[in-house]
Amino acid sequence: MTVIEMSAVTKEYGAVRALDGLDLRVERGEIVALLGPNGAGKTTTFELLLDLARPTRGDVAVLGGAPATARGRVGAMLQSAGLPEQVTVRELVRLVGRSYPAAVPTDELLRRVSLHERASRVVTSLSGGERQRLLLAMALVGEPELLLLDEPTAAMDVASRRAFWAQARTAVGHGATILFATHDMAEAQGVADRILVMARGRLLADAPPAELVADDDLEAVFLALTEEISAAHPEGALS
């Protein structure tokens, strides 16, 4: 089943074109990395998929329908997400779970993301990596069919990243599909089934890691692709 399909999607904010004819497709059970520099259009892509914005032109489908119809079936971690501070970890996850028709039991979920020992702590007492795991718990509480993760491991050390992706793969084992945005090329290469490279609102490459890098390293491929489109559009009209 196709979980995400974007066809010829353009998104403009006044004179700024954040997405420029984007075509993107993700199938059920895949872990797909969305790689690109700042301003590539990654966050805008997530906003369209979550029905937080509408395309200027083109079509967006999530789980076979309009994004608005899939809200209860999608979990998300966004960079812009804030957390209420004077509530406990357990209280917050339980509260989010009430918005879903069927939620994972809170304590079971906190064990799954290694936060069970922090369940009674207030959010302000958590480290950066623990906050990210809390955001993951909030994204997973409704047993989503699709997980959208925007820079999910940015505040984590190496051990925490490994644990995070082990937990994310468990979600895939339970039927989820993952699209995640990252600047970390090693993470994309090590985790993803496919890597999508974006720049200036356009998709430049879509391939499994081994096929994309071939005899070169991913950083060299990424720089070559993004520098090529920057040279073709020196006016900076895209964002």
Image: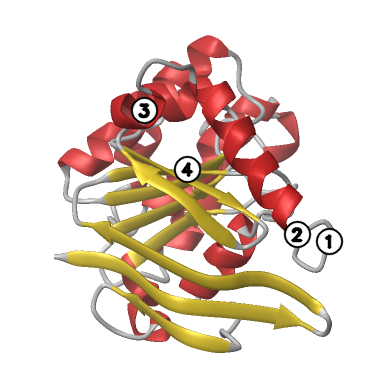
Earlier-in-chain disc, 1 versus 4: 4
The answer to whether mark 2 and mark 1 are in CB contact below 8 A is yes
The number of callouts visible is: 4
Residue at the disc numbered 4: 136
Q: Are marks 2 and 4 in contact (CB under 8 Å)?
A: no
Cα separation between marks 1 and 3? 32 Å
| Residue type beneath disc 3 | Val
Say whether disc 4 or disc 3 marks the residue closer to the N-terminus. 4
Instruction: Indicate which disc, 1 or 3, sits on the residue closer to the N terminus.
Output: 3
Q: Nearer the viewer, mark 4 or mark 3?
A: 3
Give the quadrant of the N terminus. Answer: bottom left
Residue in view at x 50 percent, y 20 percent: 186
Q: Quadrant of the C terminus?
A: bottom right
Q: Please tell me whether mark 2 or mark 1 is closer to you in this view.
A: 2
Q: Position of residue 67 (x, y in %)?
A: 41, 80
Q: Nearer the viewer, residue 138 or 171?
A: 171
Contact flag, marks 4 and 3 (Cβ < 8 Å)? no
Secondary structure under tag 1 reads loop
Badge 4 element: helix
Q: Give the numbered dot on residue 236.
A: 1
What distance separates the C-alpha of mark 3 from that of mark 2? 31 Å
- Which residue is tagged 3? 191
Q: Nearer the viewer, mark 1 or mark 4?
A: 1
Disc 1 marks which amino acid?
A: Gly
The amino acid sitting under disc 4 is: Leu
**Of marks 3 and 2, the one in the foreground:** 2
Q: Tell me the CA gap for discs 2 and 4.
A: 37 Å
Residue mark closest to the camera, 2 vs 4: 2
Pointer 2 or 4: first along the chain: 4
Residue 140 placed where, x, y %? 37, 50
Cα gap from disc 2 to disc 1, whole angstroms: 6 Å
